[in-house]
Image: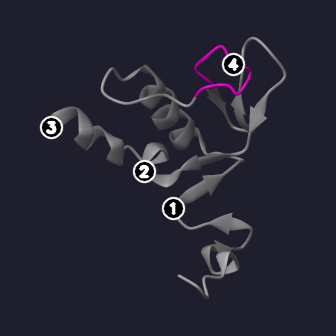
């Protein structure tokens, strides 16, 4: 990895393995269902309170502060995370 170039991971402003806002309605449904699953660790706010984020079309939001996040791992946005519940 001596010659690793991180720019290779970015395509159209998006890193491999990530989706960026605006999220589709279906992605919002998958992301919020992911947040409620007892089998995975949810996306949480960086404010230090481990508050689960809420997915909206415009990205993640924290209900306690002004924190926003515009990306998610692709597997959390397309329901493929559900296989973790079956293991």
Percent position (x, y) of residue 54?
A: 62, 24
- The span from disc 3 to disc 1 (Cα, nearest Å) is 22 Å
The image quadrant that residue 14 belongs to is bottom right
Callout 3 secondary element: loop
Q: Nearer the viewer, residue 24 or 17?
A: 17
Q: How many residues crowd around disc 4 within 10 Å: few (fewer than 14), some, or many (20 or more)?
A: few
Q: Is residue 55 above or below residue 74?
A: above
Disc marking residue 75: 2
Q: Is residue 22 above or below residue 12?
A: above
Query: Do tag 1 and tag 4 residues touch (Cβ < 8 Å)?
Result: no
Q: Secondary structure at mark 2?
A: helix
Residue topped by disc 3: 87
Residue that extends furthest to the left in the rendered view of this protein: 87
| Residue at the disc numbered 1 | 17
Q: Is residue 81 left or right of residue 25?
A: left
Tell me the magenta residue range: 44-53
* Overall secondary structure of the magenta section: loop
- Depth check, mark 4 against mark 2: the one in front is 4
Q: Compared with residue 83, is residue 11 higher up or lower down, i.e. above or below? A: below
Q: Could you tell me if the residues under marks 2 and 1 are in contact, i.e. CB atoms within 8 Å?
A: yes
Task: Please check the rendered image and state whether residue 48 is part of the magenta-colored stretch, yes or no.
Answer: yes
């Amino acid at each position: 990895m001596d010659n690793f170039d991180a720019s290779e991971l970015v395509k159209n402003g998006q890193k491999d393995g990530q989706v960026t806002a605006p999220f589709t309605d279906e992605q919002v449904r998958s992301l919020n269902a992911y947040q409620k699953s007892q089998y995975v660790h949810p996306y949480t706010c960086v404010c230090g309170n481990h508050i689960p984020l809420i997915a909206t079309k415009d990205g993640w939001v924290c209900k306690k502060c002004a924190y926003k996040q515009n990306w998610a791992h692709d597997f959390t946005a397309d329901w493929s995370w559900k296989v973790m519940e079956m293991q």
